[in-house]
Amino acid sequence: MNTLVILAALVPIVLCAKHPSRPVDAVSRRSEMVKFGTLCKGNPANKPRGCDKFGCGSYGARRDGGKRKHLGLDISCSDGDTVLTPFDVNITGLARPYKNNKNPAINNGVSLSGQGLCFKLFYLKPVKTSGMLRKGERLGTMLPMQKVYPGIGSHVHVQMCDHSDPTKYF
């Protein structure tokens, strides 16, 4: 029994020694195991947006002729569809993808936290901008991307607060 306790105490120390720049704690271990539930009612498998004339939906895809990289992951969602919470979340406020209210028809979104993660979802009209929601509850409505970008693969943009790659959570 004592040996088991000692081994359990040493595992995080060994892991920290192996990856000293990344502390090992309960939150980081738990967030590594998180998987997003369905984001868009019409896309229960969270199929990502592919490539179209406006670019690709993967994290790191080049934008503006290679001048910048895409800092999120685009999950396909039809205009007007219901956007759902991927797990129990705390809504921490509004999030807008564009500065200076560029593209006002789709310049809306929400900041969220839950499961040890902080993230933003863009291109939806949220049902509320603060409080808690349970997994699978209605978070909002997908905004009309086709009005602003005709021919784009309509999508919810998922962006981590620290700009890291959200792909591993899908």
Image (cartoon, rainbow, N blue to C red):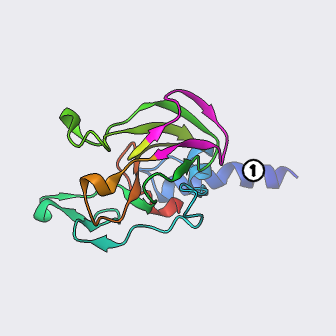
Residue 18 x %, y %: 49, 59
Viewer-nearest residue: 156 or 60: 156
x 53%, y 38%: residue: 113
Q: Horizontally, is 102 left or right of 18 in the view?
A: left
Q: Horizontally, is 86 left or right of 69 in the view?
A: right
Using the image, determine if residue 76 lies above or below residue 13: below
Mark 1 lies on a secondary structure that is: helix
Using the image, determine if residue 72 lies above or below residue 94: below
In the image, residue 139 lies in the stretch drawn in magenta = yes
In the image, residue 135 lies in the stretch drawn in magenta = yes
The three-letter code of the residue at mark 1 reads Ile
x 30%, y 42%: residue: 105
Residue 54 x %, y %: 22, 65
Q: Which residue is mark 1?
A: 6
Query: Do we see residue 116 in this rendering?
Result: no
Q: How many marks?
A: 1
x 12%, y 59%: residue: 67
Q: Horizontally, is 170 left or right of 30 in the view?
A: left
Query: Do we see residue 105 in this rendering?
Result: yes
Viewer-nearest residue: 64 or 145: 145
Q: Which residues are magenta?
A: 125-141
Residue 144 x %, y %: 36, 51
Determine the image quadrant of residue 101.
top left
Badge 1: residue crowd in 10 Å (few <14, some 14–19, many ≥20)? few
Viewer-nearest residue: 77 or 85: 77
